Amino acid sequence: MTPKFFTTSLLASALFLGLGLAPVMAQGTNTPAIDRAQEAISARIQQGMASGHITPSEARELLRRDRDIDQRESRFKANGSTTPQERQQLRADVDSLGNEVERLMMNNSYVQPPANNAGTTTGIDNRQQNISQRIDEGVRSGRITQREARRLHRSEREIARHEVAYKRDGVVTPQERRQLREELVRLNDELNRMMRNDRGDRNSYNQQR
């Protein structure tokens, strides 16, 4: 939703650096094709954030996967070479990550950045940032499934489109601000419901059916 979320490559850079997710470049030059593919994917993630196709939550997850691949590549290269099996695994990992990035980029529910002189909604933006971070935490802890996270991300984009529309005339009216806050409250309530859900009990119930 928030312009800060979706409008600048600077935010993407902040995710790389501020979250400690700067790519770890593997040493050596014996996997140049894989290294180039990872560089292209990193650039594509930044492009997706700038265009609004990829939310900050989704970008953080993609960058974690990218870092995992870098670390695995470094381990494989520790002895000075990589086996055909290791190369095959790296290629499969990179292909999987690239396909996920492209899937998100093809999503039609993207947010065009607002004009630079658009009205500010700092409090609303901060609230969405908090919700976005909690979605990440829910996925990491297992309290939210990937399917549920995708549904929450769709809601994020919907709110973002509303905010962009409200800002086109350079002013966000009190009624429009109230509408955005109400939408965020509903999204937060849905997130809280998912976070409270006892995943273990539900899985046990499903297995018994």
Image (cartoon, grey):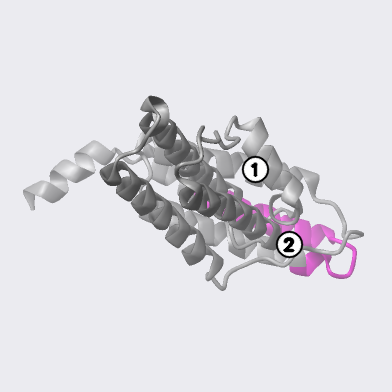
Disc 2 marks a residue whose amino acid type is: Glu
Q: Residues within 10 Å of mark 2 (few under 14, many from 20)?
A: many
Residue 163 is tagged as 2
List the single residue furthest toward the top: 79
Q: Relative to the observer, which residue lies in front, 139 or 167? A: 139
Percent coordinates x, y for residue 76 in the rendering? 36, 33
What residue is drawn where x is 58% and y is 55%? Answer: 40
Relative placement, left or right, of 100 versus 124 is left
Q: Relative to the observer, which residue lies in front, 156 or 115? A: 115
Relative placement, left or right, of 205 versus 10 is left
Q: Relative to the observer, which residue lies in front, 95 or 73? A: 73
Magenta stretch: includes residue 107: no
Q: Relative to the observer, which residue lies in front, 42 or 8? A: 42
Residue 154 is tagged as none
Secondary structure mainly formed by the magenta segment = helix
Percent coordinates x, y for residue 97 in the rendering? 44, 53
What residue is drawn where x is 31% and y is 50%? Answer: 88
* Mark 2 vs 1, N-terminal side: 1
Element type at mark 1: helix
Quarter assignment of residue 111 = bottom right
What residue is drawn where x is 15% and y is 42%? Answer: 204
Q: How many discs appear?
A: 2
List the single residue furthest toward the left: 208
Element type at mark 2: helix
**Which residues are the magenta region?**
165-189
Q: Is residue 181 above or below residue 82?
A: below
**Mark 2 to mark 1 CA distance (whole Å):** 14 Å
Pointer 1: what residue? 129
**Visible residue check, residue 151:** no
